[in-house]
Image: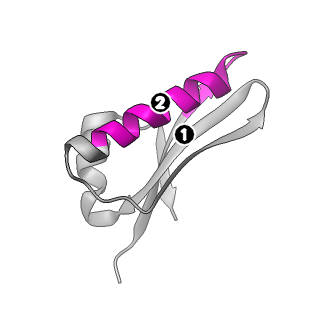
């Protein structure tokens, strides 16, 4: 069983949620264009000034996503 990694992009400010949702669109486009698998993708709003976009991928695909998309942080899923 391989590890799953959650890659995260943080957005802050009054437009944080809107920006996070827009970033999610680009993540989906990238995954489709590169024919890459992912487990889960979404947007979380923690408060009106802070939201983040995330994608959960297999450890084996993590470097492809990381190197191309430069997430702000990652964690084990």
Residue 66: % across, % down: 31, 44
Q: How many marks?
A: 2
71 relative to 63, above or below: above
Q: Within the image, what quadrant is residue 28 found in?
A: top left
Assign the magenta stretch its main secondary structure. Answer: helix
Q: Residue at x 56, y 47 (%)?
A: 42
Q: Residue at x 57, y 30 (%)?
A: 20
Magenta span: 10-30
Q: Nearer the viewer, residue 4 or 26?
A: 26
Residue 64: % across, % down: 23, 48
Q: Residue at label 2?
A: 23
Q: Residue at x 25, y 54 (%)?
A: 36
Residue at the extreme left of the image, as rendered = 34
Residue 49: % across, % down: 75, 24
Using residue 11 as the reference point, say whether residue 58 is left or right of it. left
Q: Nearer the viewer, residue 17 or 62?
A: 17
* Numbered disc 2: secondary structure: helix
Using residue 47 as the reference point, say whether residue 28 is left or right of it. left
Q: Residue at x 44, y 34 (%)?
A: 25
Label 2: how many Cα within 10 Å (few below 14, some 14–19, many 20+) = some
Disc 2 to disc 1, C-alpha distance: 7 Å
Mark linked to residue 53: 1
Q: Within the image, what quadrant is residue 68 found in?
A: top left
Q: Within the image, what quadrant is residue 45 found in?
A: top right
């Amino acid at each position: 069983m391989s590890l799953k990694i959650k890659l995260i992009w943080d957005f802050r400010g009054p437009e944080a949620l809107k920006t996070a949702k827009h970033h999610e669109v680009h993540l989906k486009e990238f995954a489709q264009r590169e024919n890459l698998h992912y487990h889960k993708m979404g947007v979380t709003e923690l408060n009106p000034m802070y939201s983040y976009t995330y994608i959960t991928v297999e450890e084996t695909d993590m470097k492809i996503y990381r190197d191309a998309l430069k997430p702000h942080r990652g964690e084990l899923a």
